[in-house]
């Protein structure tokens, strides 16, 4: 589910904030919707936050590095990162760069 975005004007610029919650069922619909938004607003300030319920780096974020769990969503998120040159910050990974911890 992709929540609609909110707009905030900061000085003379408009910032759009998107909040995402993706189910952990390997369904890429929410990321296809996000891709449409990224295409539409590609020349604007965007901030995308939320819970993607997928992993970007299978070696660090999956037990035994298994890459088949939620493969479709993981592939789609990595595709979006590459296509739109997104600057991604996984807060857990930022604080724990090498720690392996799973839920």
Image: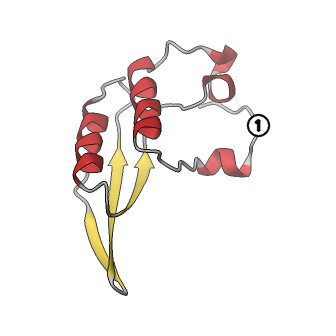
* Residue that numbered label 1 is attached to: 99
Which quadrant holds residue 98? top right
Which quadrant holds residue 27? top left
Q: Residue at x 44, y 24 (%)?
A: 75
Q: Above or below — where is 95 with respect to 98?
A: below
Whether residue 30 appears in this view of the structure is yes
Q: How many marks?
A: 1
User: Would you say 38 lies left or right of 74 here?
Assistant: left
Q: Position of residue 20 (x, y in %)?
A: 35, 48
User: Which residue is nearer to you in this view: 29 or 103?
Assistant: 29
Q: Residue at x 42, y 31 (%)?
A: 79
Quarter of the image containing the N terminus? top left
User: Which residue is nearer to you in this view: 30 or 23?
Assistant: 30
Residue located farthest toward the bottom when viewing the structure as drawn: 11
User: Would you say 63 lies left or right of 49 here?
Assistant: right
Q: Above or below — where is 3 with respect to 70?
A: below
Q: Position of residue 40 (x, y in %)?
A: 22, 52
Q: Residue at x 26, y 56 (%)?
A: 41
User: Would you say 67 lies left or right of 26 here?
Assistant: right
Q: Position of residue 45 (x, y in %)?
A: 37, 65
Quarter of the image containing the C terminus? top right
User: Which residue is nearer to you in this view: 98 or 9?
Assistant: 9
């Amino acid at each position: 589910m992709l929540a609609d975005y909110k707009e905030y004007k900061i000085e003379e610029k408009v910032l759009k904030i998107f909040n995402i919650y993706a189910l952990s069922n390997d369904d890429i619909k929410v990321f296809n919707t996000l891709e449409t938004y990224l295409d539409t607003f590609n020349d604007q300030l965007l901030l995308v936050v939320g819970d993607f319920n997928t992993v970007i780096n299978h070696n660090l974020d999956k037990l035994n590095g298994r890459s088949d769990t939620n493969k479709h969503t993981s592939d789609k998120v990595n595709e979006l990162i590459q296509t739109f040159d997104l600057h991604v910050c996984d807060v857990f990974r930022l604080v724990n760069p090498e720690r392996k911890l799973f839920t």
